[in-house]
Image (cartoon, rainbow, N blue to C red):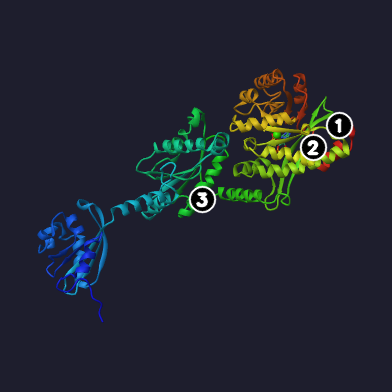
Amino acid sequence: MERETPMTGNGHISITAETVLESMTDGFYLLDDQLRFNYINEVAENLIGQSREVLIGLSIYGVFPKLRESKVEQQMLHALQMRKSVEFDEHFGNYGGWFRIKMTPLKNEGLAIYFQNTESQKQLEQKLMQFAYCDFLTGLPNRRKMTEIALSLKEKKRKFSFFYINLDNLKFINALYNYSSGDNVVVSVAQRLQQLSDNRCHIGRLEGDEFIVIRESEPGERLEIFAEKLMELFKDPFLLADYQSAYVTASIGIACIPYDTERLRDLVACAETAMYEAKKEKGSSYAFYRPKMRSKRERQVLIEKSLMGCLESSGFYFTVQPQISGGGTNLSGIEVLARWNHPKLGELSPLEFIDIAEQSGTIAHLTTHLLHEVLKVIKKWEQLHGWNIKTAINMTPSLLANPVFFEEFFNLMDHYGVKPSLLEVELTEHAEMAYSETTMRNLELCREKGVSIAIDDFGTGFSMISYLTQFPINKIKIDRYFIRKIGEDAKSEAVLKSLIHLAQSIDCELLAEGVERPEEVLFLKEHSCTVFQGYYYDKPLQIKDFEEKYLLKPSLLP
Ligand code: C2E
Ligand code: CA
Ligand code: CA
């Protein structure tokens, strides 16, 4: 038996059905076979703004004159001709925005029309779309949106470039100050980038410290001019929380479609590879992608992965380089220099892997591993040879700014039973190593425990004077750059003399690094610098060689 429907062929509505229709939150009306209003509920009445007494019997075309040749009319005729329900969304500005409309043909060729105002739902959808496509911190388009922009440019066969921008020192700002300072910087970078925005330029934030600019190409355009403009944006310091400010630099990698690659996925990788190349330069810089960079990036990724793994069995070891005093006969200290004979890449320069460790956040893992090995050896020498000389370990800025690393350092000394007075930490004079509470606390802790502090590569950094006044320094290591100039030109010799004088005036021990030639030794001694480290005396030595030369011939020990 066929189920009874509320709407019968003659448009008669049973009382229960009518109650239901009247209490519906959707609008509803019935049209007869001539498309005249036959029934209309209260919601529809209110929306149309006329009472049902007026509307019943009127043609729908009379009530909605704009219906003719509209999309709604097409749908209506389609439903009537095909005798099939249709459902669609339509925007009616005069009636409060978006509506979901459903039209169902009736047995007697009339039409039932339901409609629901979906404006607030649409707005919500749009908001969700915004969240999905927009970076919450800066309001810039996010990775997904930028991908869509790039895809649509590619579909239109446009030429364009990716400028992949990575902030070099955001993690230091987060570590040295706090995360809200880091956020301030990110927001300011976004604002500065937007100054360059125009209709060919799309600016977005990928995540963390990474921004991207997609720039549509113009014939004859020189991309380096735009890259220079980007770098200009980083010239002035950024305001942090609490009225402090800091310099932030950016490394920019550039790759172009179709010049460098035809594929979007490769374009991102190319721009990122170029960005890593730019990172090798100090301060803000940019680099265009070159095919030979690819292998360098792959090498870097391999090193990064190895750094995260177990270093014990990976060919990682250390050498020591003697520090000589007393006319060239006494051993006054040693410096630990990390080495890595990588299973796949062979012998790596510490400059390369230390930098990668520092950038990838694995430096604490590496240095802790190194400390285990070094402390074991020191303890053995103490027991076997009465070893009582300082061993210097190189520390990077992020270790200094690390709130837990130094605690572990002291725990390890306890664990191996090595006195703190047998250790020295070397800090590189580095632009990034700014004054912060954590750094200061770590250095104070070293001083309290009796670990001495040396400034490495002295004279080459930016913040020489602030170091000397802010940090508790015991030793200054004059960089090889100045030593090399001895005998070459009088001006450099004068600079070296003033550096020596400066160190002496603040009562620091002094050491000359990278001493290679006898005339260097002579000049330095003449100017009261009497501790040396360099090939003239020894290259960095493997432990076995060091033991043979210095420990098994006790005359060389002081
Ligand atoms: P650095 O701390 O300035 O170390 C001195 C560098 O100069 C060493 O290079 C050493 O082999 C080299 N050297 C010493 N005497 C001479 C000389 O007379 N002539 C010349 N031309 N070079 C000399 P190395 O071992 O390649 O290390 C390079 C840098 O890597 C180090 O510079 C240091 O900054 C970093 N490094 C090495 N090991 C470690 C480590 O365990 N931790 C950290 N954080 N950095 C390390
Ligand atoms: Ca050093
Ligand atoms: Ca050095």
104 lies left or right of 408:
left
Whether residues under marks 1 and 2 lie with C-beta atoms below 8 angstroms apart, the answer is: no
SS class, disc 1 = loop
Q: Position of residue 533 (x, y in %)?
A: 76, 31
221 vs 62, nearest the viewer: 62
Q: Nearer the viewer, mark 3 or mark 1?
A: 1
284 vs 314, nearest the viewer: 314
Residue of label 3: 269
Q: Position of residue 203 (x, y in %)?
A: 41, 43
* Crowd rating for badge 1 (residues with CA inside 10 Å; few <14, some 14–19, many 20+): some
Please indicate, yes or no, whether residue 244 appears anywhere in the rendered image: yes
Q: Quadrant of the N terminus?
A: bottom left
The answer to which of marks 1 and 2 sits earlier in the sequence is 2
Residue of label 2: 418
The answer to which of marks 3 and 1 sits earlier in the sequence is 3
78 vs 391, nearest the viewer: 78
Q: Position of residue 285 (x, y in %)?
A: 52, 37
Residue of label 1: 557
Tell me the amino acid under the disc marked 2. Val
Q: CA distance from mark 1 to mark 2?
A: 19 Å
Tell me what residue is drawn at x 83 percent, y 43 percent.
544
Which residue is the extreme one toward the bottom? 1
